[in-house]
Image: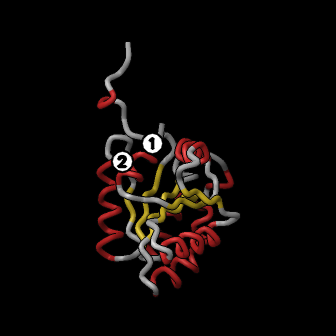
Amino acid sequence: MSVAPELVPASLLDLLLEQRFDFFTGVPDSTLTSVLNELEARSDLRYVPAVSENVAVGLATGAWLGGARPALLMQNTGLALAAHPLATLTSICRIPLLLVVGWRGHDADAPEHDFIGPATQPLLEALRIPFFVPDAETLPNDLADAVATMDSSRGVAALVIRPGVLA
């Protein structure tokens, strides 16, 4: 028995494409494996892997300056590395970017994430980046809210993805 197409939940990549994102960059993260695998499999999409999160901010900014609508994928451990260009370049120049952040350490998954897990939300708050933390059921609406925030403020907004939210 097959499932009717309208009952199959959209992937995060499908949702991003519905929101007109057309350039993707970032650093691999196991929480975001499903969307990264889809990006790597789709030669029709512009996906440029980055060597570090601060480089990804630069790539996304350049893409926006070139007329693209960028989404940046990273794990929260790289958020600190991206803090400087997010606090300066994107905020001063009012570059709208969507951050899709994998939340390592949300559930005390490994000792090396014990610090950054609890620091994720306070770091986003300190950077004045509005963020949304979806469940699987609220992902489409939370993404739409993050995009509306990004568009209306012409700034950065983040979608913080806990382990297990993406299929």
| Residue type at the position of mark 2 | Leu
Q: Residue at x 56, y 45 (%)?
A: 42
Q: Position of residue 82 (x, y in %)?
A: 59, 72
Question: With respect to residue 133, does 88 lie above or below?
Answer: below
Tell me whether the residue at label 1 lies in contact with that at label 2, contact meaning CB atoms closer than 8 angstroms. Answer: yes
- Horizontally, residue 115 falls left or right of residue 21, namely right
Secondary structure of the residue carrying numbered label 2 = helix
Q: Position of residue 6 (x, y in %)?
A: 29, 31
- Is residue 108 something that shows in the picture? no
The residue positioned farthest toward the front in the image shown: 44
| Residue type at the position of mark 1 | Val
- The label number, if any, that marks residue 139 in the structure image: 2
Q: Between marks 1 and 2, how big is the CA–CA gap?
A: 8 Å
Q: Residue at x 47, y 51 (%)?
A: 161
Q: Which residue is mark 1?
A: 165
Q: Position of residue 68 (x, y in %)?
A: 46, 68
Task: Count every numbered label the image shows and give the total.
Answer: 2
Q: Residue at x 62, y 64 (%)?
A: 78
- Is residue 119 something that shows in the picture? yes
Q: Position of residue 92 (x, y in %)?
A: 46, 87
